[in-house]
Amino acid sequence: MNNVYKILREYEWEEAKESGQITTALDKQDGFIHLSTASQLAVTLAFFFKESDSLQLLQLNLDKIDETQLIYESPLPNEGKRKSPFPHLYSQLMTNQIFESWNIKRGSFSLPEEVLLQAENAIEE
């Protein structure tokens, strides 16, 4: 199975470390934990975190995740140009289910949207 990642803003990571539970306002609103595969990370960062200069990237330890709760779903048709199925976790995500964590900083280059989408969608072809 692919590696699966969660991106958090700094304050979300600080809250998670205190409570032991990883969640965001969007996750609560949608009823599942939004995740990305490695091939989806660049587009997710460019589309949803463009205002952030520093983020926390978490790699899930899939041995500690109930596979029946991790479901790959296509984005809704009205959610833009992304086509590949996204991993969604329909259970709690706890800090002890994280394999690795990195603080990532904004780089000096931003690839065009078309190039990012080509890279993400190439995996599906």
Image: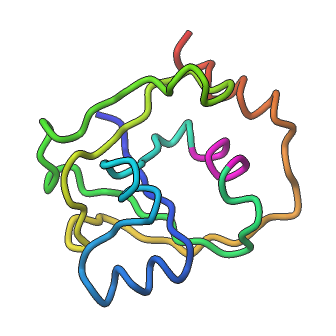
Quadrant of the rendering where the N terminus is positioned? top left
Q: Is residue 53 magenta?
A: no
Q: Residue at x 20, y 60 (%)?
A: 92
Q: Is residue 125 above or below residue 111?
A: above
Q: Is residue 115 above or below residue 51?
A: above
Residue 23 location in percent, x, y? 36, 66
Q: Is residue 82 above or below residue 93?
A: above
106 relative to 33 in the view: left or right: right
Which residue is situated farthest in the bottom direction here? 18
Q: Which residues are magenta?
A: 41-47
Q: Observer-nearest residue: 57 or 44?
A: 44
Quadrant of the rendering where the C terminus is positioned? top right
Which residue is situated farthest in the front direction here? 29
Q: Residue at x 56, y 19 (%)?
A: 77
Q: Quadrant of residue 20?
A: bottom left
Residue 101 location in percent, x, y? 42, 71
State the scheme by which the image is colored.
Answer: rainbow
Q: Quadrant of residue 94?
A: bottom left
Q: Is residue 73 above or below residue 48?
A: above
Q: Residue at x 22, y 49 (%)?
A: 62
Q: Observer-nearest residue: 41 or 81?
A: 81
Q: Quadrant of residue 109?
A: bottom right
Residue 22 location in percent, x, y? 32, 69
Q: Main secondary structure of the magenta part?
A: helix
Q: Residue at x 46, y 57 (%)?
A: 26
Q: Observer-nearest residue: 90 or 58?
A: 90
27 relative to 79 in the view: left or right: left
